[in-house]
Image (tube, rainbow, N blue to C red):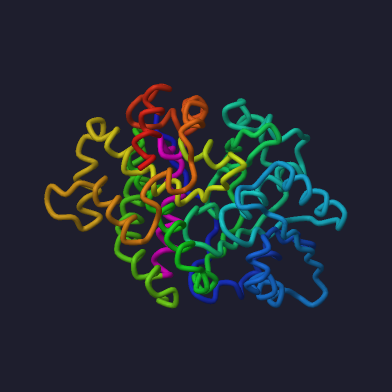
């Protein structure tokens, strides 16, 4: 039986940031904790958000979000939340800050440890609706975490796991493309390819959900038309608008599940050295996974090729590899600093990842090891 749900309250357009005070009041947040990272603070985006708030509203800031959010950072932010008597959260940043804020809203009302809420530990049923309220303000166009039901957290034991529940979807998403205009070129490329990977993987998932597939295809088409423009000219407002919409659409389709791309990027994102960018990892492994899945996708490759504007018979995997190259992304995992010796452990973890179950072609450890080798470059 198909289960279809959409989703949360979304304010979307240039200038949407000014709606923050009213949205806070609408969900009864009087003392928000702002969860961000040091880059977002340095870019002035936290102060821009705070400038919209009433003068008498206390809004402490946690800016210690690492590139791949950790359980330790969640606990640090939770401590600040409690010390200041906060009653809700504003997640401000890329996917890492938004995911960390989701984990804080969970532990603000649910007992620890965090690991018990991981999807692969049976945690979905343990997450109730009584979470601290949250508003998500994305500053990148990639993860779509502002409308996503999951948070990826690297636990103290080194595992990078998904904490997943419909209750984790932020109460309000404020999507203001203005906040992405200052993104550096390569961050724009990596996050933009993250959005493309989400659209492709959710579309390819065998779970039945035609509305989600239609949204994913629309997001893929938007991103393919606008990602190179956004990377070439970060001030291109039209391109930034469409990339933020594509990122949101990719995450709106998450209810179909993802696949082997994310089953591979999640364990790689959990290693301590080198620290690897999630969206760039997805871009680099996506062509190999598309080739692995090709014969299990029916007419979907042709439909994706059409959405991407490819010529009849065009190969989606080859087109993604060529797009990566034009964007200046690494040619393979080796170029990102990944070494051969860690691949067997990565393959073992990929099989256990919650995204493996919705890959269109069943994949065992040996398959993942071959996929990692193919993606090394």
- Residue drawn at (45%, 43%), measured in percent from left and top? 254
- Residue drawn at (56%, 43%), measured in percent from left and top? 150
Q: Is residue 8 visible?
A: yes
Q: Is residue 256 visible?
A: no
- Among all residues in the image, which is located at the extreme left? 312
- Residue drawn at (44%, 30%), measured in percent from left and top? 356
x then y, percent, for residue 78 = 78, 48
x then y, percent, for residue 54 = 76, 75
Determine whether 348 is above or below 84 in the image: above
Q: Is residue 93 left or right of residue 261?
A: right
Q: How many marks?
A: 0
Determine whether 177 is above or below 212 in the image: below
Q: Determine the image quadrant of residue 136.
A: bottom right
Q: Quadrant of the C terminus?
A: top left
Q: Quadrant of the N terminus?
A: top left
The one nearer the camera, 127 or 352, is: 352
The one nearer the camera, 32 or 304, is: 304
- Residue drawn at (33%, 31%), measured in percent from left and top? 360
- As for residue 254 lying within the magenta part, the answer is yes
Magenta residues? 240-263
């Amino acid at each position: 039986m198909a289960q279809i749900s959409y989703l949360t309250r979304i304010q979307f357009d240039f200038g949407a940031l000014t709606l923050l005070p009213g949205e806070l009041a609408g969900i009864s947040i009087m003392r928000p904790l702002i969860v961000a990272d040091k880059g977002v603070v340095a870019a002035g985006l936290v102060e821009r958000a705070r400038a919209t708030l009433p003068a008498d509203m206390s809004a402490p800031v946690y800016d210690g979000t690492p590139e791949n959010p950790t359980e330790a950072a969640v606990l640090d932010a939770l401590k600040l939340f409690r010390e200041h008597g906060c009653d809700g959260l504003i997640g401000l940043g890329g996917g890492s800050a938004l995911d960390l804020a989701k984990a804080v809203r969970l532990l603000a009302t649910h007992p620890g440890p965090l690991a018990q809420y991981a999807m692969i530990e049976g945690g979905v049923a343990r997450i109730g609706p009584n979470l601290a309220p949250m508003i998500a303000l994305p500053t990148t166009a990639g993860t779509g975490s502002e409308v996503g039901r999951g948070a990826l957290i690297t636990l103290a034991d080194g595992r990078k796991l998904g904490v997943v529940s419909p209750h984790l979807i932020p109460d309000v998403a404020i999507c203001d493309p203005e906040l992405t205009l200052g993104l550096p070129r390569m961050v724009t490329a990596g996050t933009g390819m993250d959005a493309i990977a989400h659209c492709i993987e959710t579309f390819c998932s065998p779970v039945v959900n035609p509305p989600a597939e239609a949204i994913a295809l629309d997001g893929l088409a938007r991103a393919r038309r606008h990602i190179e423009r956004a990377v070439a000219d970060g001030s291109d407002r039209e391109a930034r608008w469409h990339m933020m919409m594509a990122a949101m659409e990719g995450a709106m389709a998450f209810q179909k599940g993802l696949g082997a791309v994310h089953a591979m990027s999640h364990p790689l994102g959990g290693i301590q050295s080198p620290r690897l960018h999630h969206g760039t990892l997805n871009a680099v492994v996506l062509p190999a996974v598309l080739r692995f899945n090709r014969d299990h996708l029916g007419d979907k490759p042709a439909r994706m090729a059409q959405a991407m504007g490819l010529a009849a018979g065009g190969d989606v995997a080859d087109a993604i590899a060529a797009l990566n190259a034009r964007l200046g992304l690494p040619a393979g995992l080796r170029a990102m600093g990944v070494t051969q010796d860690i691949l067997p452990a990565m393959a073992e973890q990929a099989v256990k990842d919650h995204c493996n179950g919705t890959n269109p072609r069943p994949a065992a450890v040996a398959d993942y090891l071959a996929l990692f080798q193919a993606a090394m470059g």
